[in-house]
Image (cartoon, rainbow, N blue to C red):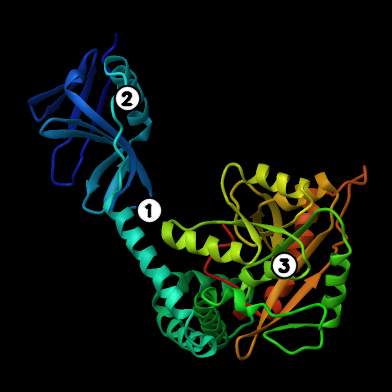
Amino acid sequence: MTDRTYAYRAHPFTSEKTFRLESDGLAWDDRGRPGRLAFADVVATKIYQERIPGSAKSYWACVLYRRGGAVKLSAAHRTGLLSAEDRSADYLPFVAALTERLAAARPGLPMREHRSLLARIDTGVGRLGVGLLRLLGRFDLRRTAAAAGWLMRKIGPRLKGHRVAGEQLAMVFPQMTEAERERTLAGMWDNFGRLFIEYAHLQRIWDYDWREPGRIGRIAVDDATHAALMRLRATEGPVLFFTGHLANWEIVPLGAKTLGRAISVVFRAPRIGPFVAEMIRAREAGGMTVIAAGPDTPLRLRESLRQGRFTGMLVDQHYARGIDVTFFGRGCKVNPMLARFARLFECPVYGARAVRLPDERFRFELVGPLDLPRDDEGKVEVQGAMQRVTDQIEAWVREHPEQWLWLHRRWR
């Protein structure tokens, strides 16, 4: 059996250590000082991903526990206090062989759960955020949203995302003066601050009832959108919806509940667990079924459409494995999933958005069903359909650029 080797530096102030995998244990050399851990002495293992200060990546790590200590291996080779080299190409086959030999020597060895310091911090921040959201729900929406908008107008320009937003805004609106761009970005930050507060009041914001279209409330609907809602109410079977990160995009799916229809929405979760759970709870309280973005997303979307549900997704962010479209005259990538399902199910496609109005009111707008391009066989043409959808997003952004989330790097 060939002895594999792997070398890495665990800390910026220690030397590089070379590990050698033997038939019955793990040996290492640390600047001429040998060490060894027999598989018979291992009492537990832990395999996890760790984050290194100064690096945006996560690296695989493995810990072998013995009585009185532990031995750790990581794919992160520390090259400095805030830097690391990714040695996954050597680490992964070495640890795969290590765990295989260890399992053969010690079947049923316990596996310990890992919770890093950063993960514990994330959890604490998440719980604090959830508590703050629930507390804010007891205060007046108009005043707290205005305060949050004011605060983000002061803080936002000092954050890293402000530079990205400014670069993209200048790229697609070169005719804007610097003062106009700063006003637009201030509006974006104001919108972002208000959005956080509105999470706490999400279920109370939507008050439009199609049976009383003339009633004045927080949600305003024009005649064209009211007619589109009535067409939707009479539509049987699945319907696809798209929107973008405009104004408060979270209230867009709430209209389905007033029509008595179930809706599934795709949700890209942040890393902070408790906050994610609260966001999902708020959505589901509004009658939505949340589909967390992941490997099984297409299967779950397909099942939602097969059940005849309304199904919605955001379509205005970069997708590395996407198809090419033109957005503001520049090429970018977009996820083609919406068009592919429209082709598969031959279901109508609608665009929906909320436009922010003064005093925490919104105008809900619905366009569609869209007349999508078709191929020679009469089926929805995927690239052309996604271009049509992207054109609609662009038209919305042009109308209210201060209400779009310019923080995401759309062109890459």
Does 213 appear above or below 24? below
| Callout 1 amino acid | Ala
Mark 3 or mark 2: name the one nearer the start of the chain: 2
- Tell me, for residue 56, which label it has, or none: 1
- Between label 3 and label 2, give the one nearer the viewer: 3
Measured as percent of width and height from the top left, residue 176 is found at 61, 83
Q: In which image quadrant can residue 245 be found? A: bottom right
- Between label 3 and label 1, give the one nearer the viewer: 3
Identify the secondary structure beneath mark 2: helix
Q: State how far apart marks 3 and 1 are (Cα).
A: 40 Å
Measured as percent of width and height from the top left, residue 20 is found at 22, 21
- Tell me, for residue 257, which label it has, or none: 3
Does 120 appear above or below 49? below
Q: Which residue is outermost to the left?
A: 33
Is residue 54 at all visible to an observer of this figure? no
Residue drawn at x 72%, y 62% as measured from the top left: 242
Front residue of 137 and 353: 137
